Protein backbone atom coordinates (compact mmCIF):
# COMPACT_ATOMS: atom_id res chain seq x y z
CA UNK A 1 0.00 0.00 0.00
CA UNK A 2 2.87 2.42 0.70
CA UNK A 3 4.14 2.09 -2.88
CA UNK A 4 0.70 2.95 -4.24
CA UNK A 5 0.42 5.94 -1.92
CA UNK A 6 3.78 7.45 -2.80
CA UNK A 7 3.49 6.77 -6.53
CA UNK A 8 0.14 8.49 -6.83
CA UNK A 9 1.10 11.31 -4.47
CA UNK A 10 4.15 12.03 -6.64
CA UNK A 11 1.93 12.06 -9.71
CA UNK A 12 -0.51 14.44 -8.01
CA UNK A 13 2.31 16.82 -7.06
CA UNK A 14 3.76 16.79 -10.60
CA UNK A 15 0.31 17.50 -12.01
CA UNK A 16 -0.22 20.38 -9.62
CA UNK A 17 3.19 21.87 -10.39
CA UNK A 18 2.33 22.05 -14.09
CA UNK A 19 -1.16 23.39 -13.46
CA UNK A 20 -0.59 26.13 -10.94
CA UNK A 21 2.53 27.38 -9.19
CA UNK A 22 0.85 29.84 -6.88
CA UNK A 23 2.03 29.43 -3.31
CA UNK A 24 -1.43 29.87 -1.81
CA UNK A 25 -2.74 27.02 -3.98
CA UNK A 26 -0.07 24.70 -2.64
CA UNK A 27 -0.78 25.97 0.85
CA UNK A 28 -4.45 25.04 0.46
CA UNK A 29 -3.63 21.57 -0.91
CA UNK A 30 -1.05 20.92 1.79
CA UNK A 31 -3.34 22.16 4.55
CA UNK A 32 -6.17 19.93 3.32
CA UNK A 33 -3.91 16.87 3.19
CA UNK A 34 -2.60 17.52 6.69
CA UNK A 35 -6.12 18.02 8.04
CA UNK A 36 -7.65 14.92 6.46
CA UNK A 37 -4.70 12.55 6.84
CA UNK A 38 -3.21 13.60 10.19
CA UNK A 39 -5.93 15.78 11.78
CA UNK A 40 -3.52 18.71 11.82
CA UNK A 41 -5.95 21.51 10.98
CA UNK A 42 -6.02 25.27 11.36
CA UNK A 43 -8.09 25.52 14.50
CA UNK A 44 -11.02 23.43 15.67
CA UNK A 45 -13.38 21.95 13.09
CA UNK A 46 -16.30 20.89 15.30
CA UNK A 47 -18.01 17.63 14.38
CA UNK A 48 -19.96 14.96 16.18
CA UNK A 49 -18.06 12.12 14.51
CA UNK A 50 -14.34 11.49 14.21
CA UNK A 51 -12.60 8.92 12.06
CA UNK A 52 -9.17 7.31 12.18
CA UNK A 53 -8.51 4.88 9.38
CA UNK A 54 -6.37 3.05 6.89
CA UNK A 55 -6.92 2.46 3.18
CA UNK A 56 -10.43 1.10 3.74
CA UNK A 57 -11.35 4.71 4.56
CA UNK A 58 -8.93 6.58 2.28
CA UNK A 59 -6.66 4.72 -0.13
CA UNK A 60 -4.65 7.66 -1.44
CA UNK A 61 -4.78 10.97 0.44
CA UNK A 62 -8.32 11.68 -0.70
CA UNK A 63 -7.47 10.95 -4.35
CA UNK A 64 -10.61 9.40 -5.91
CA UNK A 65 -9.07 6.15 -7.13
CA UNK A 66 -12.03 4.43 -5.51
CA UNK A 67 -14.78 5.65 -3.17
CA UNK A 68 -13.80 3.99 0.07
CA UNK A 69 -15.81 4.04 3.31
CA UNK A 70 -15.04 7.64 4.26
CA UNK A 71 -16.26 9.30 1.03
CA UNK A 72 -19.18 6.87 0.84
CA UNK A 73 -20.32 7.86 4.31
CA UNK A 74 -19.73 11.56 3.63
CA UNK A 75 -21.38 11.70 0.22
CA UNK A 76 -24.25 9.24 0.64
CA UNK A 77 -25.01 9.35 4.36
CA UNK A 78 -24.18 12.98 5.19
CA UNK A 79 -21.46 12.33 7.75
CA UNK A 80 -19.24 15.28 8.55
CA UNK A 81 -15.98 13.88 9.84
CA UNK A 82 -12.88 15.21 11.46
CA UNK A 83 -10.20 12.65 11.17
CA UNK A 84 -6.91 11.10 10.23
CA UNK A 85 -7.23 8.67 7.32
CA UNK A 86 -4.43 7.50 5.09
CA UNK A 87 -3.68 4.37 3.07
CA UNK A 88 -1.01 2.29 4.77
CA UNK A 89 -1.72 3.64 8.25
CA UNK A 90 -1.19 1.14 11.04
CA UNK A 91 -2.68 1.07 14.51
CA UNK A 92 0.87 1.16 15.85
CA UNK A 93 1.48 4.46 14.02
CA UNK A 94 -1.75 5.95 15.32
CA UNK A 95 -0.82 5.21 18.92
CA UNK A 96 2.81 6.27 18.49
CA UNK A 97 1.82 9.59 16.92
CA UNK A 98 -1.07 10.27 19.30
CA UNK A 99 -3.51 10.80 16.43
CA UNK A 100 -6.47 10.09 18.72
CA UNK A 101 -5.63 13.27 20.65
CA UNK A 102 -5.44 15.34 17.46
CA UNK A 103 -8.82 14.08 16.26
CA UNK A 104 -10.35 14.89 19.66
CA UNK A 105 -8.80 18.36 19.56
CA UNK A 106 -10.31 19.01 16.13
CA UNK A 107 -13.74 17.53 16.90
CA UNK A 108 -14.29 19.56 20.03
CA UNK A 109 -16.76 19.14 22.87
CA UNK A 110 -19.64 17.96 20.66
CA UNK A 111 -17.87 14.92 19.27
CA UNK A 112 -19.47 11.72 20.59
CA UNK A 113 -18.09 8.95 18.37
CA UNK A 114 -14.82 8.00 16.67
CA UNK A 115 -14.95 5.43 13.86
CA UNK A 116 -11.89 3.19 13.49
CA UNK A 117 -10.64 1.26 10.47
CA UNK A 118 -7.37 -0.16 11.73
CA UNK A 119 -5.44 -3.36 12.27
CA UNK A 120 -5.17 -4.76 8.76
CA UNK A 121 -1.81 -3.19 8.01
CA UNK A 122 -0.44 -4.36 11.35
CA UNK A 123 -1.29 -7.92 10.33
CA UNK A 124 -0.01 -7.56 6.74
CA UNK A 125 3.33 -5.92 7.49
CA UNK A 126 6.57 -7.90 7.05
CA UNK A 127 4.93 -11.06 5.78
CA UNK A 128 8.28 -12.86 5.73
CA UNK A 129 8.08 -13.08 9.53
CA UNK A 130 5.23 -15.58 9.10
CA UNK A 131 7.37 -18.09 7.21
CA UNK A 132 7.52 -21.27 9.24
CA UNK A 133 6.01 -19.53 12.25
CA UNK A 134 2.48 -18.45 11.31
CA UNK A 135 0.69 -19.23 14.57
CA UNK A 136 3.24 -17.63 16.90
CA UNK A 137 3.63 -14.47 14.81
CA UNK A 138 -0.13 -14.03 14.49
CA UNK A 139 -0.59 -14.50 18.23
CA UNK A 140 2.05 -11.88 18.98
CA UNK A 141 0.61 -9.38 16.51
CA UNK A 142 -2.94 -9.83 17.78
CA UNK A 143 -1.72 -9.27 21.34
CA UNK A 144 -0.06 -6.02 20.23
CA UNK A 145 -3.19 -4.91 18.40
CA UNK A 146 -5.28 -5.54 21.51
CA UNK A 147 -2.86 -3.63 23.72
CA UNK A 148 -2.74 -0.69 21.31
CA UNK A 149 -6.52 -0.52 20.88
CA UNK A 150 -7.13 -0.55 24.63
CA UNK A 151 -4.42 2.06 25.14
CA UNK A 152 -5.86 4.34 22.46
CA UNK A 153 -9.36 4.12 23.91
CA UNK A 154 -8.28 4.63 27.53
CA UNK A 155 -5.98 7.56 26.81
CA UNK A 156 -8.39 9.07 24.29
CA UNK A 157 -11.32 9.00 26.69
CA UNK A 158 -9.23 10.37 29.55
CA UNK A 159 -8.04 13.21 27.32
CA UNK A 160 -11.52 14.00 26.03
CA UNK A 161 -13.00 14.15 29.53
CA UNK A 162 -10.11 16.21 30.90
CA UNK A 163 -10.36 18.74 28.09
CA UNK A 164 -14.08 18.93 27.35
CA UNK A 165 -15.85 17.09 30.17
CA UNK A 166 -18.92 14.97 29.59
CA UNK A 167 -19.18 11.27 28.85
CA UNK A 168 -16.47 9.09 27.31
CA UNK A 169 -16.41 8.73 23.55
CA UNK A 170 -17.83 5.69 21.81
CA UNK A 171 -15.26 3.97 19.58
CA UNK A 172 -16.73 2.02 16.65
CA UNK A 173 -14.46 -0.37 14.80
CA UNK A 174 -15.33 -2.51 11.80
CA UNK A 175 -13.82 -5.85 11.01
CA UNK A 176 -12.77 -6.29 7.39
CA UNK A 177 -14.56 -8.49 4.87
CA UNK A 178 -12.81 -11.48 3.36
CA UNK A 179 -9.86 -10.82 1.04
CA UNK A 180 -9.54 -12.38 -2.38
CA UNK A 181 -5.89 -13.48 -2.57
CA UNK A 182 -6.24 -14.50 -6.22
CA UNK A 183 -6.93 -10.95 -7.43
CA UNK A 184 -4.10 -9.25 -9.35
CA UNK A 185 -2.56 -6.14 -7.75
CA UNK A 186 -3.64 -2.77 -9.13
CA UNK A 187 -0.02 -1.63 -9.28
CA UNK A 188 2.84 -4.10 -9.59
CA UNK A 189 4.53 -4.62 -6.24
CA UNK A 190 1.51 -3.45 -4.23
CA UNK A 191 0.24 -6.99 -3.69
CA UNK A 192 -0.25 -7.18 0.08
CA UNK A 193 -2.63 -10.04 0.79
CA UNK A 194 -2.14 -11.60 -2.66
CA UNK A 195 -1.13 -15.19 -3.32
CA UNK A 196 1.43 -13.81 -5.78
CA UNK A 197 3.25 -12.12 -2.91
CA UNK A 198 3.00 -15.17 -0.68
CA UNK A 199 4.67 -17.19 -3.43
CA UNK A 200 7.31 -14.56 -4.15
CA UNK A 201 8.52 -14.27 -0.55
CA UNK A 202 8.33 -17.98 0.12
CA UNK A 203 5.29 -17.98 2.40
CA UNK A 204 3.93 -21.37 1.41
CA UNK A 205 0.32 -22.00 2.43
CA UNK A 206 -1.78 -24.99 1.30
CA UNK A 207 -4.66 -22.76 0.25
CA UNK A 208 -4.29 -18.97 0.13
CA UNK A 209 -8.02 -18.30 0.51
CA UNK A 210 -8.27 -20.55 3.56
CA UNK A 211 -5.18 -18.91 5.06
CA UNK A 212 -6.42 -15.33 4.60
CA UNK A 213 -10.02 -16.03 5.61
CA UNK A 214 -8.96 -17.90 8.74
CA UNK A 215 -6.67 -15.02 9.68
CA UNK A 216 -9.47 -12.52 9.08
CA UNK A 217 -11.93 -14.51 11.20
CA UNK A 218 -9.37 -14.57 14.02
CA UNK A 219 -8.99 -10.79 13.79
CA UNK A 220 -12.75 -10.28 13.95
CA UNK A 221 -12.92 -12.60 16.96
CA UNK A 222 -10.22 -10.53 18.63
CA UNK A 223 -12.33 -7.38 18.22
CA UNK A 224 -15.32 -9.15 19.77
CA UNK A 225 -13.15 -10.11 22.75
CA UNK A 226 -12.11 -6.49 23.28
CA UNK A 227 -15.74 -5.35 23.42
CA UNK A 228 -16.17 -7.53 26.51
CA UNK A 229 -13.40 -5.59 28.26
CA UNK A 230 -14.05 -2.07 26.98
CA UNK A 231 -17.64 -0.80 27.42
CA UNK A 232 -17.08 2.15 25.05
CA UNK A 233 -15.71 -0.10 22.26
CA UNK A 234 -18.25 -1.22 19.64
CA UNK A 235 -17.54 -3.81 16.94
CA UNK A 236 -19.30 -4.00 13.56
CA UNK A 237 -19.08 -7.21 11.55
CA UNK A 238 -18.80 -6.59 7.79
CA UNK A 239 -18.02 -10.15 6.77
CA UNK A 240 -20.05 -11.79 3.99
CA UNK A 241 -20.99 -8.42 2.47
CA UNK A 242 -18.93 -9.06 -0.67
CA UNK A 243 -19.80 -12.68 -1.24
CA UNK A 244 -18.70 -14.69 1.76
CA UNK A 245 -16.02 -17.11 2.90
CA UNK A 246 -13.39 -18.08 1.85
CA UNK A 247 -12.93 -15.09 -0.46
CA UNK A 248 -14.94 -12.12 -1.65
CA UNK A 249 -16.28 -12.07 -5.21
CA UNK A 250 -13.82 -10.81 -7.80
CA UNK A 251 -16.38 -8.50 -9.43
CA UNK A 252 -16.66 -6.57 -6.16
CA UNK A 253 -12.92 -6.25 -5.53
CA UNK A 254 -10.34 -3.69 -6.66
CA UNK A 255 -7.42 -5.87 -5.60
CA UNK A 256 -6.67 -8.56 -3.06
CA UNK A 257 -7.83 -6.66 0.03
CA UNK A 258 -9.80 -3.63 -1.19
CA UNK A 259 -13.29 -3.49 -2.62
CA UNK A 260 -14.06 -1.56 -5.80
CA UNK A 261 -16.62 1.26 -5.96
CA UNK A 262 -19.57 -1.14 -6.07
CA UNK A 263 -18.14 -3.24 -3.27
CA UNK A 264 -17.62 -0.22 -1.03
CA UNK A 265 -21.18 0.86 -1.79
CA UNK A 266 -22.40 -2.41 -0.28
CA UNK A 267 -20.00 -2.14 2.67
CA UNK A 268 -20.95 1.48 3.41
CA UNK A 269 -24.66 0.69 3.25
CA UNK A 270 -24.32 -2.16 5.74
CA UNK A 271 -22.00 -0.17 7.99
CA UNK A 272 -24.21 2.95 7.96
CA UNK A 273 -27.31 0.94 8.89
CA UNK A 274 -25.55 -0.84 11.74
CA UNK A 275 -24.04 2.29 13.30
CA UNK A 276 -27.12 4.51 12.86
CA UNK A 277 -28.51 3.65 16.32
CA UNK A 278 -25.24 4.94 17.78
CA UNK A 279 -24.54 7.99 15.61
CA UNK A 280 -28.07 9.00 14.56
CA UNK A 281 -26.63 10.07 11.22
CA UNK A 282 -27.53 8.97 7.71
CA UNK A 283 -31.16 7.87 7.75
Image (cartoon, grey):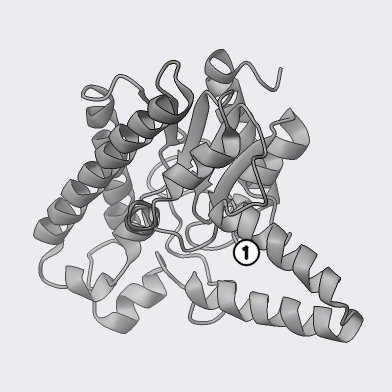
Residue 198 image-quadrant placement: bottom left
112 versus 239 height, above or below? above
Q: Position of residue 40 (x, y in %)?
A: 58, 54
| Residue 167 visible here | yes
- The foreground one among 30 and 208 is 30
- The foreground one among 88 and 185 is 88
Q: Position of residue 237 (x, y in %)?
A: 42, 31
Residue picked out by circle 1:
60
- The foreground one among 275 and 182 is 275
* Quarter that holds the C terminus: top right
Q: Residue at x 19, y 72 (%)?
A: 129
Q: Position of residue 5 (x, y in %)?
A: 57, 72
108 relative position to 131: left or right = right
| Residue 235 visible here | no
Q: Residue at x 24, y 37 (%)?
A: 222
Q: Position of residue 118 (x, y in %)?
A: 41, 48
- The foreground one among 176 and 62 is 62
190 relative position to 150: left or right = right
How many tags in the picture? Answer: 1
193 versus 233 height, above or below? below
* SS at mark 1 in the image: loop
Count residues near mark 1 (Cα–Cα under 10 Å), then give few for <14, some for 14-19, many for 20+: many
Residue 258 image-quadrant placement: bottom right
Residue 161 image-quadrant placement: top left
Q: Residue at x 16, y 47 (%)?
A: 143
Q: Residue at x 47, y 34 (%)?
A: 238
Amino acid sequence: MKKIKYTVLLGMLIFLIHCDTKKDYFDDIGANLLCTTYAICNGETPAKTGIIGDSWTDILLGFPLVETLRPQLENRYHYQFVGATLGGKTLQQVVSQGLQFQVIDQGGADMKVIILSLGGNDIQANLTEYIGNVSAVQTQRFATIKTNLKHMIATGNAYKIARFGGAPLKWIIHGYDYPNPYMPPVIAGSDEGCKSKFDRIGLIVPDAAVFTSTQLDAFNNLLVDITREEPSFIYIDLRNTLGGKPNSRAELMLDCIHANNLGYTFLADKFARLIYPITNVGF
